[in-house]
Amino acid sequence: MLRRYAATVLCFVAFAAVGAGLRPAPAAASISSTISSILQKHHVAKGDAGVYIWDFDAAQEVFASRPDARLVPASNMKLVTASSALHSWGPEHRFKTELYGPDVPVYEGVFYGDVYLRGFGDPSLSTLAYQRTALHLTTSSFEAFARRLRALEVRKIKGSVLGDESWFDKKRSGPWKSSLQLESGRLSALSGNESLDDGNRVKDPATYAARLLTEALRAKGIKVTGKPGTGRVPGTARLLKQQFSAPLRTLLKRMNKESDNFFAETLLKGLGRDFGGEGSTRAGLDVSRANLAAIGLDAAAYRLLDGCGLSYENRLTPRDLVRVLGAARQRLAFDDYYDALAIAGEDGTLEDRMRGTAAAGNAHAKTGSLSIAVCLSGYVTSANDHLVGFAILVNGNSVNWEDATTAEDDVVKLLAATSLSGARQIRVTPTLRQHPLSAFDAVNPVGSLLQAVVQP
């Protein structure tokens, strides 16, 4: 929340002791050597690891080890996708799904003809049961469409429910190893329950969505004579109901806290359709690249192949990931970006990490795990209330998950318990950000290009 970083004067509170044991906070002068010791102790100080840590408030580097190495980010790629989505759509954006029927009146409770469910890239369209048990959010539902037809006094559909997925291209997967395809599932502009049927990924998302609507209609007492399938909405069809998803800020919580690959890839295609002219992964990546260019990243320093991080060919540097975090902090939707991240010791993929430490309830970060990469990037507030951005990317032919995560956690816990040196250069208040950014404003939040902005 912005209130975490509110400051009305440029002053610091000295912390003489931290934690239940009242142990002194580590001196800032020793933090770099302490971080190096942590990395060495857990065997992640080798050539395949990169670390960059930046104090946003003091506008200075805290630690760097191979900060410009091009490394596999795993699901830290979702930090880029979330940044592009918020900057392009805004936090209030909602994805629509439309229900069409034959352009004839209901006669004695009967619809004569097919009904069509047209998708526009809502990754959250689902049954109410799936929302309660899996998504843990309230969003667009099949039951709401069934209620609409019931309100129109429809009791029978002499036809089928057909799914229209034409908003996106026909490519169903990303550039992933075959063993990872199920981690996201088949992609479509129209899907239901994240294309999961009793835990199994379905082969035809649009037909499955049509089936879920058929089942919802029958549960409402509406008989459907035909089998669910796919089809394009004809020009003669009549719009019966539009339904909108939960706001983007809510969907991003699902994507980043739980590291939901299906959400990330569907949002990426949606970015391509809305801002790149084509509902494809390629067009969505072009939007993300434009967002990174606006932040000031050199295109030669990274490689984007997907939106979720499953590709072993993605590359980002630790410094550039912290730049993404810094740019998010300068934008008006920072609260939504920050709140969408897992909270150490509390929820998401960090629920069981860093509990009972200064980082618990403090660090907001994105995890990332592949067989060749274990990563953690995000924000933590120091003992003297400095907001710190960090990116810790551990790569290797076979990364030891326990060593890598222990090292990451120990570094973040150290940052949370340390009073960092340096006078506050950049101040953020609850009502005034440094400056709003347009899509074309260059932002250089870290490194040698940073020009500290001090609010009056």
Image (cartoon, rainbow, N blue to C red):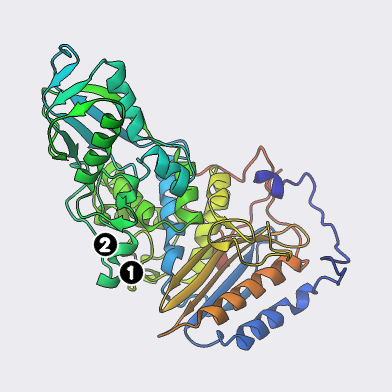
Left or right: 150 as drawn, with respect to 159:
right
User: Percent x, y for residue 240?
Assistant: 25, 22
387 and 148: which one is in front?
Answer: 148
Q: Which residue corresponds to the image point at 56% horizontal and 67% vertical from the top-left? A: 447
Q: Of the two numbered discs 1 and 2 on the same chain, state the one appearing first in sequence.
A: 2
User: Percent x, y for residue 162?
Assistant: 16, 36
User: Percent x, y for residue 398?
Assistant: 42, 84
327 and 105: which one is in front?
Answer: 105
Q: Which of the 4 image quadrants contains residue 212?
A: top left
SS at mark 1 in the image: loop
Left or right: 58 as drawn, with respect to 51:
right
Dot 1, how many residues are within 10 Å of its Cα: few (below 14), some (14-19), or many (20+)? many
Find out whether the residues at labels 1 and 2 contact each other: C-beta distance under 8 Å. Answer: yes
Q: Is residue 158 above or below residue 107?
A: below
Q: Amino acid at mark 1?
A: Ser
Res 311 label: 1
User: On the rendered image, what quadrant is the C terminus found in?
Assistant: top right
Left or right: 313 as drawn, with respect to 155:
right
Q: Amino acid at mark 2?
A: Gly
Residue 275 visible to the viewer = yes
Badge 2 is on which residue? Answer: 174
CA gap between label 1 and label 2 equals: 8 Å
Residue 62 visible to the viewer = no
Q: How many tags in the picture?
A: 2
SS at mark 2 in the image: loop
Q: Which residue corresponds to the image point at 66% horizontal and 74% vertical from the top-left? A: 410
